[in-house]
Amino acid sequence: MTRSQRGGTPSRAAKRPSHPSHSSNASAGSAAGSPGNGSAKAKRSRKSPKKRSGRRLPLRYLLPCVLLLALMAMLMLRGYVHSEILADHRVRPPVSNDQVPKDILKGGPVIDTRSENRRSLKVPDYELVLTFDDGPDPRWTPKVLDMLRKHDAKAVFFITGTMASRYPDLVQRMVDEGHEIGLHTFNHPDLSLQSKDRIDWELSQNQLALAGAAGIRTSLFRPPYSSFSERMDNRTWPVTQYIGSRGYITVVSDTDSQDWQRPGVAEIIRRSTPERGEGAIVLMHDSGGDRSQTVAALDRYIPQLQVKGYKFDTLTGALKAPSAHTPVAGLGLVKGKVWVTLVQVSENTTSVLVVALAVVGVLVLARFGLMLVLSLVHARRVRRRNFRWGPDGPVTEPVSVLVPAYNEAKCIEKTVRSLVASDHPIEVLVIDDGSSDGTAGIVEELGKDLPGVRVVRQLNAGKPAALNRGIANARHEIIVMMDGDTVFEPSTVRELVQPFADPRVGAVAGNAKVGNRDTLIGAWQHIEYVMGFNLDRRMYDILRCMPTIPGAVGAFRRTALERVGGMSEDTLAEDTDITMAMHRDGWHVVYAENARAWTEAPESVQQLWSQRYRWSYGTMQAIWKHRGSLFDRGPSGRFGRVGLPLVSLFMVVAPLLAPLIDVFLLYGLIFGPTEKTIGAWLGVLAVQVVCAALAFHLDKERMTHLISLPLQQLLYRQLMYVVLLQSWITALTGGRLRWQKLRRTGAVGLPGGSPEGAVPQQKSAERRPVG
């Protein structure tokens, strides 16, 4: 359940100076005509433009976007080094070789085209150069290196940039143990199908990874999908020439083990053994699949040929040439190290995210399963014919209904009239929290004609203070609380107070519903409210850890309120705070499904953002405030070790990680595997549809609103995720969040009835409290 499922919207405003002299003194000062006052006023007027121009967007508004962009960047980098982005897996079939010089076709496997005097070289007799392609691999390359060290043999490793970026320690080990490094491109494409710009990019990126891994660059290169020099054709020869012009020596092979086919250890040895003591460049692989046969073959192959007089050396060692390695320093080295570091951060982060995604998936499915089972158990229990909340029968005693109101002139008449129409005996107490739009006057006029309606005025002090003022002035033991923008059905109060027949019940949560659901954003909130209240609240009721009594419709025992100290101003979520305090004091908190209240939900993204941001942050504050219950005994300890972890997990942690599903969905749609990605997302959506349909069925709602559920999952949920992320950042950075007063339209009425016209308002500008 999210914080959005409280129902209702805040009527509390931030505290303003409460002493009457503040405003009168300010007026007197402004009206004074002394030169000193005029000078001060002039100075203030000169400074005011500077203050306005210096306003900046708070950092915590930027951090969520920055974090999401960083996450996408890391995924893109991961896809790049895993050959999922910008990779080209096409392989061109062979063509004619009539344009390839004869001396190249009949020459050796080392081709030097760095100058006009092209040449090819062969390895001297009894010299073997073992070459390994496609690595380094975290599993097989260490085993190959161990085998080479065991038999005191050297080799050449033609590495790809993608693997070198991910496993730089293995590249460093190759160099440290005396082996030679060659390039095998970055993404392993067929270069005969690529442009010169792409070839340059493959080479430079490969060198960048090598510089970052081992601090060197190399002049050796082996084209992907290459074979013997005699198989060079009219498409690969121009590539070889161009590679030479870039300063590289092309190295192919003249003995191919074909170990990628896994033909068996004996066959690999047979194919790798030259005839009559000839020297050879032997092609093997240390990556790209199961290389257990290659490792086993090396353990027999190397000593067998060493006994015959063969020497296993690097390429430049066998040719008695200068080393192919050149140290990298300065900016090139820095770029390489930065690149490798970024790849490592991306690899580690995305690995953690993959695990987190699996955890989120399990949590989501477990939560849905738990909600389905427990909500059905709850519905069957409270809908039995002989179900009774307590042994003393229905609750018929009168109750006090508290309506804290700040600038609710557009809504307050409907709210009061809906209460007076209640079929349960009530008194209506409107606590005007320093409204400036005539809210109190409207209620006083209504009170002349409507029995049991009273107004209590106070200077603006905030919603918790207004509720505490109402509790002090209430006449009855059972107290119902609602928001000033909410209307009750005639049966709402009666249904809401029936659970108090059980003396263990200290508070009751009602069923808040979105009244303005005719817009798309209203329909999305309607789905969210129905799913939250009908499934989450039923689940929490059965588990006895209801986290929130919604501000729009909730009821309390006065005794319970007094025992926990009343409504607290410690958090911005006073309804969650008081509910947790009730649990810790040993009271039961239950859900009354038929106590329906119709509230006005935000109608713009900006208002919705402000409301949910406050709710999320307030919930975190409440969880932190009651963290001590984890170590308590008795009812407080039970809530701390059962309720608090569930609330923290399902309301704060899991929703924060849930965007991973959508991020990986977007990544999978673009870079694949597209079919599996769509299937997985549709599977999660199907589970949500089932849960939503059950919630709508239990609440007797029309299913037509569920048509917008897929779109809600794609758009609305993302907004809620970013809001929660921003709340986390605010909490971690120690920021303070101010109360927001939402703009009302007064359009919400009871279903089936036309909303009444607005009451004439006093002509005073509606001011919103600051702070």
Image (cartoon, grey):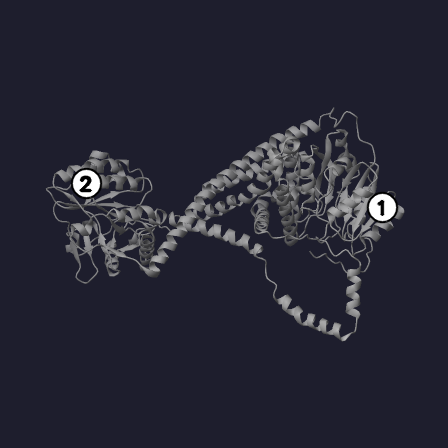
> Looking at the picture, how far across and down is residue 210, in whole percent?
31, 53
Q: Is residue 633 left or right of residue 105?
A: right
Q: Nearer the viewer, residue 486 or 191?
A: 486
Amino acid identity at mark 2:
Ser
Of the image marks 1 and 2, the number of the one nearer the N terminus: 2
Please name the residue that numbered disc 2 is placed on. 272
Amino acid identity at mark 1:
Arg
Q: Quadrant of the N terminus?
A: top right
**Looking at the image, residue 628 lies above or below residue 123:** above
Q: Residue placed farthest to the right in the image? A: 448
**Looking at the image, residue 284 lies above or below residue 195:** above
The residue sitting at 63% across, 31% down in the picture is 633
Q: Quadrant of the C terminus?
A: bottom right
Q: Is residue 640 left or right of residue 82?
A: right
Residue 61 shows in the view: yes
Disc 1 secondary structure class: strand
Please name the residue that numbered disc 1 is placed on. 454
Q: Nearer the viewer, residue 370 or 454?
A: 454
